[in-house]
Image (cartoon, helix red, strand yellow):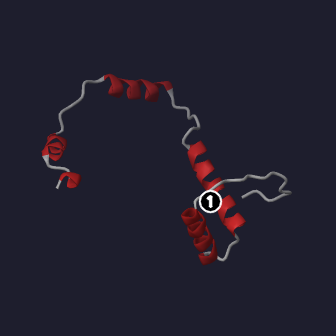
């Protein structure tokens, strides 16, 4: 996490249950609620943003990727069998 002068504020509204959980988790780690919250929020924000970053591949790799997308779907017997089984939620 970047250190430096903290000049910005972020206010959030939470339920009593959420607040208690956050306070307990911070206490378990020996952190303040503010430190715990800022770290958790920052880590999650970075995780989300990482998933949005672009990446580059060679033209050959791109063409191969597109060929796989354009190819007809192949039948996977194991997947067919799995989909025919009742879901655990249906039991």
Residue 32: image location, x then y, percent: 70, 71
In the foreground, 15 or 89: 15
If the image is split into quadrants, where does the N terminus sit? bottom right
In the foreground, 41 or 61: 41
| Residue at the image point whose x is 60% and y is 43% from the top | 49
Name the residue tied to disc 1. Answer: 40
Residue 64: image location, x then y, percent: 39, 27
| Residue at the image point whose x is 14% and y is 48% from the top | 85
If the image is split into quadrants, where does the C terminus sit? bottom left
Residue 39: image location, x then y, percent: 66, 60
| Residue at the image point whose x is 58% and y is 69% from the top | 20
Which element is circle 1 on?
A: helix
Residue 78: image location, x then y, percent: 16, 45
| Residue at the image point whose x is 62% and y is 59% from the top | 40
45 in relation to 26, above or below: above
Residue 66 horizontal side relative to residue 35, left or right: left
Residue 22 horizontal side relative to residue 62, left or right: right
Residue 14, quarter of the rendered image: bottom right
Q: In the displayed image of the protein, which residue is found farthest to the front?
A: 16
77 in relation to 10, above or below: above
Residue 37, quarter of the rendered image: bottom right
Residue 39 horizontal side relative to residue 6, left or right: left
């Amino acid at each position: 996490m970047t250190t430096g002068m903290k000049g910005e504020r972020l206010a959030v509204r939470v339920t009593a249950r959420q607040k208690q959980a956050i306070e307990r988790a911070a206490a378990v780690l020996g952190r303040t609620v503010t430190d715990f919250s800022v770290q958790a929020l920052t880590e999650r924000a970075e995780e989300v943003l990482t998933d949005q970053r672009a990446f580059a591949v060679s033209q050959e790799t791109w063409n191969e990727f597109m060929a796989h997308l354009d190819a007809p779907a192949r039948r996977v017997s194991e997947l067919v069998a799995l989909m025919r089984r009742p879901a655990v939620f249906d039991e």
